[in-house]
C-alpha cells in the first residue's frame, strides 16, 4: 500500500503547492483511492507533478463535510467520469466556524448521481470499510472548538456525525481519518489499527495554557499505549506535532505535501 500526500498545510517540495487542507491518494492491491480533495483544485495540479493519474481513481472517499477536505469535489467530478464518491448522509448539513464563516460543502453538488450516501457502517468490499462510530460511546471528551452545524435555521454545536473513517485491510489494518473531530483517542479506542493516517485536530491547543499542554501530554501517554504507527499532519498543527514527536519518537511521523509512505 502506498499513500501519497497530494495536499497538506505544508510542503516538502518547493515545486508543489500547499494549502490548509488535506488530500491523499492511496494505492492498495485492488483500488486507486482519492481520500479527500483539499479546498481547491491544487490536489489535481500536485498529483500531475507527482505522477499520479487521478483519472484512474476508482473510489473517492470524503472524510467529512468541511471545505478544506471537500472543496475540490467539483473539479474531481470533471476530471474523473466514473469513480463513486462515498460520504456520510449528513455531509451536506451546513457547517460553520462560529456563526458567520461557512465552512461546509458546495450545496449545488448534493444531488450528484455518483455520490453514495452511507450511514454508520458500509463495507465496500473485503478490503475497504467505512465507519462513523456514531453509535459508540466516547470514552474521551469531544471538543467542537466553535464549530457548528445549522439545523432548521438554528446553529448547534457540531456533533461530527458527518465524519467517517476508512479502514483498509491488507497484510495490516490501516485507518485513514481526515481530522479526527470525534477525538483521536476515541478513534484509537474504537478501531485499534496497526497504522493510523490523519489529522489529530490539536492545532487550536495553546502552548501558553497549562491545561492545553496537559491535553497534549495526556494524548501522548494514551497514544503510546498502542503498538500503532501514526502518520499525521494538517489540523494536528506543526508546533503541536513537534511536541508529540519529542515524546513519541519513531512512533509518529509527519505527512507533508509531496510525501510518499509505503505501508
Image (tube, grey):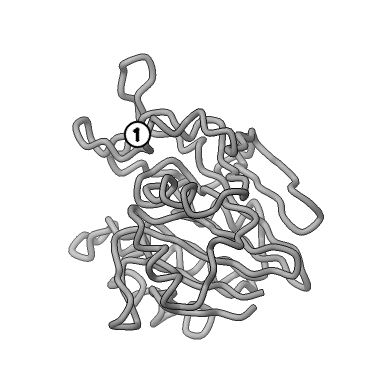
Q: Which residue is mark 1?
A: 95
Viewer-proximal residue among 115 and 35: 115
| Quadrant of residue 45 within the rendered picture | bottom left
**Picture coordinates of residue 244, whole percent (x, y):** 40, 74
Residue depicted at x 38% and y 56%: 38
Q: Residue at x 31, y 66 (%)?
A: 9
Q: Quadrant of the N terminus?
A: bottom right
Dot 1 falls on a residue whose secondary structure is: strand
User: How many numbered discs?
Assistant: 1
Identify which residue, 49 or 215, lies in the foreground.
49
Work out whether 70 lies above or below 172: above
Q: Is residue 144 above or below residue 261?
A: above
Residue at screen point 38% across, 38% down: 105
In front: 235, or 49?
A: 49
Residue 91: % across, % down: 48, 35
The x, y position of residue 52, in whole percent, is 52, 72
Please identify the quadrant where the C terminus is shown: bottom right
Q: Residue furthest top?
A: 152
* Residue at 46% from the left image edge and 78% from the top image edge: 50
**Is residue 21 depicted above or below 116 in this figure?**
below
Instruction: Kindly give the residue lying farthest to the right in the view shown.
Output: 126
- Determine which quarter of the picture holds residue 86: top right
* In the image: residue 17, left or right of residue 132: left
As displayed, is residue 34 above or below residue 254? above
Give x and y (percent) for residue 98: 23, 35
- How many other residues sit within 10 Å of disc 1, few (<14), some (14-19) or many (≥20)? many
Amino acid at each position: 500500500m502506498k499513500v501519497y500526500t497530494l495536499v497538506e498545510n505544508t510542503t516538502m517540495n518547493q515545486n508543489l503547492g500547499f494549502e490548509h487542507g488535506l488530500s491523499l491518494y492511496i494505492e492498495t492491491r485492488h483500488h486507486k483511492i482519492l481520500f479527500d480533495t483539499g479546498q481547491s483544485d491544487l490536489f489535481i495540479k500536485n498529483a500531475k507533478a507527482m505522477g499520479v493519474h487521478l483519472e484512474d481513481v476508482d473510489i473517492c472517499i470524503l472524510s467529512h463535510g468541511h471545505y478544506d477536505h471537500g472543496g475540490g469535489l467539483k473539479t474531481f467530478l470533471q476530471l474523473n467520469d466514473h469513480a463513486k464518491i462515498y460520504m456520510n448522509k449528513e455531509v451536506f448539513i451546513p457547517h460553520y466556524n462560529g456563526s458567520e464563516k461557512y465552512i461546509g460543502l458546495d450545496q449545488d453538488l448534493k444531488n450528484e448521481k455518483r455520490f453514495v450516501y452511507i450511514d454508520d457502517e458500509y463495507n465496500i468490499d473485503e478490503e475497504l470499510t467505512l465507519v462513523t462510530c456514531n453509535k459508540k460511546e466516547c470514552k474521551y471528551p469531544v471538543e467542537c472548538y466553535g464549530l457548528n452545524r445549522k439545523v432548521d435555521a438554528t446553529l448547534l454545536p457540531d456533533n461530527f456525525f458527518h465524519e467517517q473513517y476508512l479502514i483498509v485491510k491488507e497484510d495490516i489494518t490501516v485507518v485513514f481519518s481526515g481530522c479526527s473531530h470525534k477525538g483521536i483517542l476515541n478513534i484509537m479506542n474504537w478501531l485499534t489499527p496497526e497504522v493510523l493516517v490523519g489529522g489529530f485536530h490539536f492545532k487550536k491547543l495553546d502552548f501558553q495554557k497549562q491545561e492545553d499542554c496537559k491535553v497534549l501530554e495526556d494524548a501522548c501517554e494514551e497514544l503510546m499505549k498502542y503498538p500503532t504507527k501514526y502518520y499525521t499532519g494538517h489540523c494536528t498543527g506543526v508546533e503541536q506535532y513537534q511536541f508529540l514527536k519529542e515524546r513519541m519518537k519513531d512512533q509518529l511521523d509527519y505527512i507533508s505535501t509531496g510525501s510518499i509512505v509505503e505501508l
